[in-house]
Image (cartoon, helix red, strand yellow):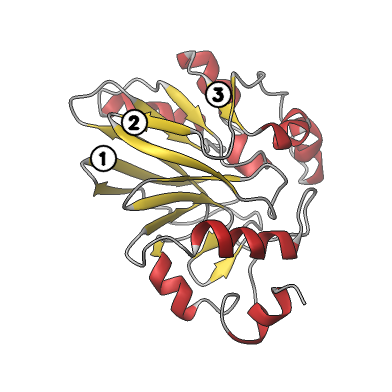
Amino acid sequence: RHRGREIPHRPENAHWRLAISESLEIVAMPNGVFEEVCYLVYRAGHPDTVIVDPGEDAGRFLAEARSRARTISAIWLTHAHIDHIQGVGALKAATGAPIYLHPDDRALYDNLPQQGLWFGLRVPAPPPPDIELAHGQILEIGGSRFEVRHTPGHSAGHVVFVTDAMVFGGDALFAGSIGRTDLPGGNHATLMTSIATQLLPLPDPTVVHPGHGPGTTIGRERRSNPFLTGPAAARGRPA
């Protein structure tokens, strides 16, 4: 089965999507050669505006925020692969917003220029993170509380941001797939454990906003994701 949602190519039609959940407005912004999905998240009438995983097209993210009369107040990172952090420097310079990152991905984050070379890209070093994320930490957007859950496997410091009705899942779980584990910090068994212990216990209606591809729900993936059911799932379970 193919799970290469992070293979670089230029999308022909990357439509940005608006969703509303728990009175939060969520703008999904597929972007760049990796088709990474960055999210702008805010509550109308409240100043908090968070951007999750700003990838390649920082100028477009800033323009989208301006078009909605929003000022980005925080930068949340699920992990530090190039496609999820390439725009961090430009956003930090433009807004001064604090950068949130789990410390287990700090080495990967600091190595952004080398990551760029792997794909033939010249990328400057990012600014240092401001706030370390930790498992169980609570963050807020306009009064909505998000729990940080450490979900290593795709990378050592990968996290997801969970609230009652949804999760920003980064590259742990996709619609019909899971994150790749052949990049630095990846481990298939660890990823399967993270999904089993941190994501699958969530209620079936929980909406998953992933780092690539369309949204899904926990229930849909529990029932039909080939990496969570059948032979592929069995190979990922510890003996």
Residue 141's disc is: 2
Identity of the residue drawn at 48% across and 56% down: 12
Q: Which residue appears farthest toward the bottom when viewing the image? A: 231
Which is nearer the N-term, disc 3 or disc 2?
A: 3
Which is nearer the N-term, disc 2 or disc 1?
A: 1
- Residues 117 and 163: in front is 163
What is the crowding at mark 1: few (fewer than 14 residues within 10 Å), some, or many (at least 20)?
Answer: some
| Amino acid type, label 2 | Ile
Residue 24's disc is: 1
Label 3 secondary element: strand
Q: Which residue appears farthest toward the left when viewing the image? A: 45
Residue 43's disc is: none
Q: CA distance from mark 2 to mark 1?
A: 8 Å
The total number of labels drawn is 3
For the N terminus, give its image quadrant.
bottom right
Label 2 secondary element: strand
Q: Position of residue 64 (x, y in %)?
A: 34, 32
| Amino acid type, label 3 | Ile
Where 147 falls versus 67 (above or below)?
below
In the displayed structure, does residue 217 sit left or right of residue 172? left
Identity of the residue drawn at 46% across and 63% down: 201
- Return the residue at label 3: 99
Question: Does the residue at mark 3 contact the one at mark 1 (Cβ under 8 Å)?
Answer: no
Label 1 secondary element: strand
| 3 or 2: mark nearer the eye | 2
- Residues 214 and 178: in front is 178
Q: Position of residue 170 (x, y in %)?
A: 54, 49
The quarter of the picture where residue 230 lies is: bottom right
Q: Position of residue 127 (x, y in %)?
A: 65, 18
What is the crowding at mark 3: few (fewer than 14 residues within 10 Å), some, or many (at least 20)?
Answer: many
For the C terminus, give its image quadrant.
bottom right
Question: Does the residue at mark 2 contact the one at mark 1 (Cβ under 8 Å)?
Answer: yes
